[in-house]
Image (cartoon, rainbow, N blue to C red):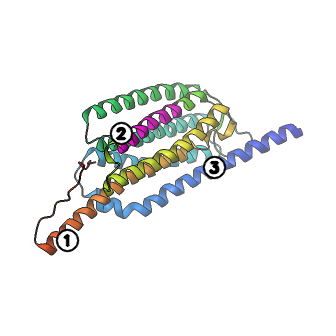
């Protein structure tokens, strides 16, 4: 084997190892966050009535425990038959798209709540969301059909070896996600300046804090992923999709948990005040508090 080929194999092996580390770390983050927030989920979600936000929470919360291990087997399993590589890729990619779409749906719901349940806001952003999801499904379908797999570069390197595929389509999908989330964030910032700039309502502050953190973190990661896909950085194309899938789940579910936790603490404080004074206390505010 020539020095040039040896160097190419070594670079490929190094990149694949980096992808494996990031994917394993992503699963660790998912499990760790689940353990950290499990008590909140039990107390705030399990006994609550069935609502759209609860359904979205459960989907965002639990579906990664199915597809993230599938994605890990895609990059870690030894001697995977080429047909199985294709099937694993279809499942992992489809579920990642589904999970990110659920996270975006939670953002739309949050924006609707902040607008004071403005029906026009719901219609506009739901339409944008639906068009984006439909376009993403079409492009992901075309991408999956374009995928080609070959034998491993070396027998010692586990996982599937992608030898071809139109990665630009995936890059465009992430760009659409970036555009949609940017529009949602710009609108909520404008809404906050117009309607809530003088508010000291903890509910509102939580919605804005979590939403802005969600946007800034995922915008940076999605932009980096787009750069890797468009640049065609070989094996690194699988570096961030699983991580992004996990972080969409973690951050979107935390938005709902934190909002419900604020609601519970306010109800408890109201009950204690009423018990102490023997009178009914209503929380007065200069704004109408949104509900999720």
| Label of residue 20 in the image | 3
User: In what element is the residue under mark 2?
Assistant: helix
Q: Residue at x 44, y 51 (%)?
A: 251
User: In what element is the residue under mark 1?
Assistant: helix
| Label of residue 193 in the image | none
Q: Residue at x 60, y 30 (%)?
A: 167
Q: Indicate the position of residue 72 as horizontal and vertical percent values.
A: 56, 48
- Gap between marks 2 and 1, in whole Å? 34 Å
Q: Indicate the position of residue 39 as horizontal and vertical percent values.
A: 36, 64
Magenta segment includes 209: no
- Gap between marks 3 and 1, in whole Å? 51 Å
Q: Magenta segment range?
A: 173-193
Identify whether 228 is placed above or below 41: above
Q: Circle 1 sits on which residue?
A: 272
Q: Main secondary structure of the magenta part?
A: helix
Residue neighbourhood size for the residue with mark 3, other residues' Cα within 10 Å, grouped as few (<14), some (14–19), many (≥20): many
The reply to whether the C-beta atoms of the residues labelled 2 and 1 are less than 8 Å apart is no
* Residue 155 visible in this rendered orientation of the protein: no
For this rendering, which residue is in front, 181 or 101? Answer: 181
Q: Circle 2 sits on which residue?
A: 108
């Amino acid at each position: 084997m020539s020095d040039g080929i040896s160097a190419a194999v070594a670079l490929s092996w190094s990149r694949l190892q980096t992808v494996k580390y990031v994917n394993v770390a992503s699963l660790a983050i998912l499990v760790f966050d689940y353990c950290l927030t499990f008590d909140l989920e039990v107390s705030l979600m399990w006994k609550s009535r069935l609502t759209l936000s609860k359904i979205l929470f459960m989907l965002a919360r639990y579906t990664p425990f199915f597809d993230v291990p599938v994605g890990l087997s895609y990059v870690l399993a030894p001697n995977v038959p080429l047909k199985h590589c294709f099937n694993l890729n279809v499942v992992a990619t489809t579920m990642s798209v589904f999970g990110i779409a659920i996270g975006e749906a939670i953002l739309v719901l949050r924006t609707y709540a902040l607008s004071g349940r403005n029906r026009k806001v719901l219609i506009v952003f739901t339409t944008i969301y639906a068009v984006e999801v439909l376009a993403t499904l079409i492009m992901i379908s075309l991408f999956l059909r374009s995928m080609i797999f070959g034998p491993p570069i070396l027998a010692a390197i586990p996982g599937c070896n992608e030898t071809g595929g139109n990665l630009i389509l995936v890059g465009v999908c992430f760009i659409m996600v970036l555009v949609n989330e940017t529009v949602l964030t710009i609108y909520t910032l404008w809404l906050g300046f117009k309607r809530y700039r003088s508010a000291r309502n903890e509910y509102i502050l939580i919605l804005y804090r979590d939403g802005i953190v969600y946007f800034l973190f995922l915008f940076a990661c999605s932009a980096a992923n787009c750069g890797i896909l468009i640049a065609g950085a070989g094996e690194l194309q699988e570096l961030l999709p699983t991580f992004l899938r996990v972080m969409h789940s973690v951050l979107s579910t935390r938005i709902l948990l934190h909002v419900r936790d604020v609601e519970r603490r306010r109800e408890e404080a109201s009950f204690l005040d009423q018990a102490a004074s023997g009178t009914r206390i209503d929380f007065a505010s200069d704004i109408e508090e949104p509900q999720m």
